[in-house]
Image (cartoon, rainbow, N blue to C red):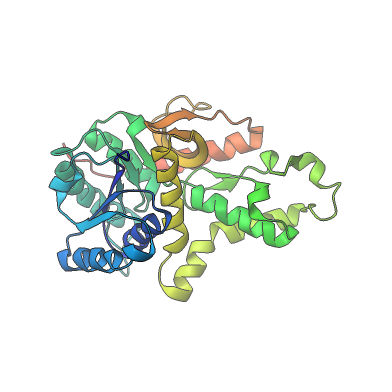
């Protein structure tokens, strides 16, 4: 009998429904539960996905409620409030904290063993909030972090060099947001490190080009939202990649949002950092050999997030 692999997705909006579709295409689970406050939407998505089973992988897909989180291996939370016109980032964060309090309380009634994968923005803050509200071991709680940002960076470098992005190894770290940054000192293209890339005409990236690539990466979501209203394909693939690493105990290194304790002097905050991911969630946070300037940027990112967290009213 095949090993049970059960994934629950809470929130069946653009990201949640696209993630569910991605799980079906990849055949990552044999049981997939969709939970949404709009029950009709969840049921419609489940029915639509079931109609494709003949053309995909055997899977038990259904709309459920929080009691169906019982014995799930991974619970992916994509639910959350969208920003209203004129609403501040802090107001949005406060509303999402309240939404998360309700969701997490409902889940914990039935499951305290699953890996929680957080996708709702601001993802680093909500990953932190999830740890504080649940009291679960920090190894069980992972945010999507800067995995998508790193994929965007590598895509843009691939366009510049005309090289497969899978042969490009570079990472964005820090906040999934305005204070994130690329770790240029660790960039390598199939073993050619940053200090030697300038010797190769094809791989040479000037300081000006690096700055442009960084800005394009950081602002990619704004560009997509302006053109079509939301981002969901690539983040769904990012979430599926994390699930794949967990369920397969792959010990893959992925830049996800994790709780930091004395990481280069940074404490009590969640940031996107390359992390070894396996069946129990976080296996180990990678101690990156950053330059002095990069450490400074990381600390700045941490302080920015902490300043927002201090303004949030956490429930008792």
The quadrant in which residue 192 appears is top right
Query: Where does the C terminus fall, quadrant-wise?
Result: top left
Residue 207 in sight in this render: yes
> Residue drawn 53% across and 30% down?
286
Q: As drawn, is 303 to the left or to the right of 313?
A: right
The quadrant in which residue 257 appears is top left
- Whether 265 is drawn above or below 89: the answer is above
Q: Nearer the viewer, residue 17 or 123?
A: 17
Callout count:
0
Q: Nearer the viewer, residue 295 or 2?
A: 2
Q: As drawn, is 219 to the left or to the right of 33?
A: right
- Residue with the most extreme front position: 1
> Residue drawn 29% across and 35% down?
131
- Whether 29 is drawn above or below 282: the answer is below
Residue 308 in sight in this render: no
The quadrant in which residue 16 appears is bottom left
- How far from the left and from the top, in percent, is residue 150? 56, 50
- Residue with the most extreme bottom position: 227
Query: Where does the N terminus fall, quadrant-wise?
Result: top left
- How far from the left and from the top, in percent, is residue 110? 15, 39
- Whether 260 is drawn above or below 297: the answer is above
Q: Nearer the viewer, residue 274 or 266?
A: 274
- How far from the left and from the top, in percent, is residue 243? 40, 45
> Residue drawn 22% across and 41% down?
314
- How far from the left and from the top, in percent, is residue 103? 19, 48
């Amino acid at each position: 009998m095949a090993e049970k692999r059960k994934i629950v997705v809470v929130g069946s909006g653009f990201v949640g429904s696209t993630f569910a579709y991605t799980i079906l295409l990849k055949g990552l689970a044999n049981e997939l539960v969709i939970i949404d406050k709009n029950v009709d939407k969840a049921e419609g998505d489940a029915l639509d996905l079931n109609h494709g089973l003949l053309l995909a992988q055997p899977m038990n897909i259904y709309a459920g409620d929080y009691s169906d989180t019982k014995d799930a291996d991974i619970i992916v939370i994509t639910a959350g409030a969208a920003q209203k016109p004129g609403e501040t980032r802090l107001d949005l964060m406060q509303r999402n904290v309240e939404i998360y309090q309700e969701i997490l309380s409902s889940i914990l009634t039935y499951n305290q063993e699953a890996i929680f994968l957080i996708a709702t923005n601001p993802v680093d803050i909500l990953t932190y909030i999830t740890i504080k509200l649940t009291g679960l071991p920090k190894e069980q709680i992972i945010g999507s972090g800067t995995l998508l940002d790193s994929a965007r960076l590598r895509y843009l470098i691939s366009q510049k060099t005309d090289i497969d992005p899978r042969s490009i190894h570079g990472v964005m770290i820090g906040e999934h947001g305005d204070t994130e940054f690329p770790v240029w000192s660790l960039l390598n293209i199939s073993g050619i490190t940053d200090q030697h890339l300038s010797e190769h005409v094809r791989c040479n990236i000037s300081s000006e080009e690096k700055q442009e690539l960084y800005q394009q990466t950081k602002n990619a979501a704004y560009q997509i939202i302006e053109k079509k209203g939301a981002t969901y394909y690539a983040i769904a693939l990012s979430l599926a990649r994390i699930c794949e690493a967990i369920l397969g105990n792959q010990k893959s290194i992925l830049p996800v949002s994790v709780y930091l304790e004395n990481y280069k002097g940074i404490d009590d905050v969640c940031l996107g950092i390359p992390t070894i991911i396996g069946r129990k969630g976080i296996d180990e946070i990678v101690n990156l050999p950053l330059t002095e300037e990069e450490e400074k940027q990381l600390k700045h990112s941490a302080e920015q997030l902490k300043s927002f967290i201090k303004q949030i009213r956490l429930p008792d």
